[in-house]
Image (cartoon, rainbow, N blue to C red):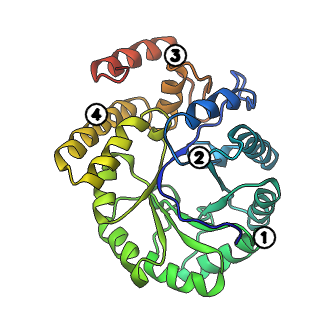
Amino acid sequence: MKNYQRLEGLVAAVFTPMNQNGEINLEAIDKYAQYLIQSGITGVFVNGTTGEGASLTTDERKQILERWIAAIDGKLKVINHVGSFSLPQSAELAAHSQACGADAIASIAPSFFKPATVEDLVQFFKPIAAAAPELPFYFYDMPSMTGVQLSLEQFLLRGREEIPTLVGVKFTHNDLMEMGACLALDNGAFEILHGYDEVLIAGVSLGAVSAVGSTYNYFAPTYLKVLEAMRQGDLATARSNQLRSIELVKVIIRYGGGVRGGKAIMNLMGYDCGPCRLPISAFSDKEYEILRSDLEAIGFFH
């Protein structure tokens, strides 16, 4: 792998800007990227759940990655999600990621025909990672969406035997016992990227040093305070800022969750992310009005 360095800090799982007709809006990425560069985060995670990657065509995913890489211009790490139901499609996206200059790739498990065993999962990922042999590979583990719940410890140990570029897991579930075990595995050999924004403090307490999440797009300063307070051993400050995150997430849930609600927040902030692609419904004017009021009530804009 070329220039591999472990991630530290926050990685924003970025939204895919779209026009009102559901077409991708590449031009909006430029302003969005400049905002993130100034926000204090470490990197961006492109074409993932937040980016509606499963609703995009292969060509759209390539165009989106290329635009993010150009807009970031080396100022942040760019991790591209290449997962899909189709192994050849994922391998094609992985090769493209390397060719156009991404810093790493990640893949979720297929969730229609599911891997039944750890070995099945390893063999599915092996040719995908091999298509980008210079890039670190992360398993994007999200059982709530995929229905695939296999032992991560076994996957990591078996996976590194077959996948030389396997460096860790984007851990997007809340089994903190498993997270702690993976962080300690083989004396900390693997990166475990914390994936639940609303309990970041818990992951950091177990030893996580990096996190990927959607709310880091628009609430990064609060999470950076959590990280800094934990480094300083100031639990009171860390807890108070984590509670601010919890209040925000409670609001987002009322509006359909992190993708639908998060895109609406970005729009309210002046970063044109547009609507989601169907089947996720568009926000109404009335919803925007109520959302703004709800955000004001928790001090979001201050």
The C terminus is located in which quarter? top left
Tell me the CA gap for discs 1 and 4: 42 Å
Q: Nearer the viewer, residue 129 or 250?
A: 129
Say which of marks 4 and 3 sits in front.
Answer: 4
Dot 2 or dot 1, earlier in sequence: 2
Q: Secondary structure at mark 2?
A: strand
Q: Which residue is mark 2?
A: 44
Dot 3 or dot 2, earlier in sequence: 2
Does residue 106 appear left or right of residue 190 in this picture?
A: right
Tell me the CA gap for discs 2 and 1: 21 Å
Cβ–Cβ under 8 Å for marks 2 and 4: no
Cβ–Cβ under 8 Å for marks 4 and 3: no
Does residue 116 appear left or right of residue 19 in this picture?
A: left
Q: Secondary structure at mark 1?
A: loop
Q: Nearer the viewer, residue 246 or 12?
A: 12
- Which residue appears at 34% of the width and 65% of the height? 207
Tell me the CA gap for discs 1 and 3: 42 Å
- Disc sitting over residue 284 in the figure: 3
- Which residue appears at 42% of the width and 84% of the height? 186
Image location of residue 271, percent across then percent down? 59, 23
Tell me the CA gap for discs 3 and 2: 28 Å
Image location of residue 176, percent across then percent down? 31, 65
Q: Which residue is mark 4?
A: 247
Say which of marks 1 and 3 sits in front.
Answer: 1
Q: What amino acid type should be assigned to the residue bearing mark 1? A: Ala
Image location of residue 295, percent across then percent down? 35, 21
- Disc sitting over residue 289 in the figure: none
Q: Secondary structure at mark 3?
A: loop
- Disc sitting over residue 131 in the figure: 1
Placement of 44 over or under 176, stated as above or below: above
Q: What amino acid type should be assigned to the residue bearing mark 4? A: Glu
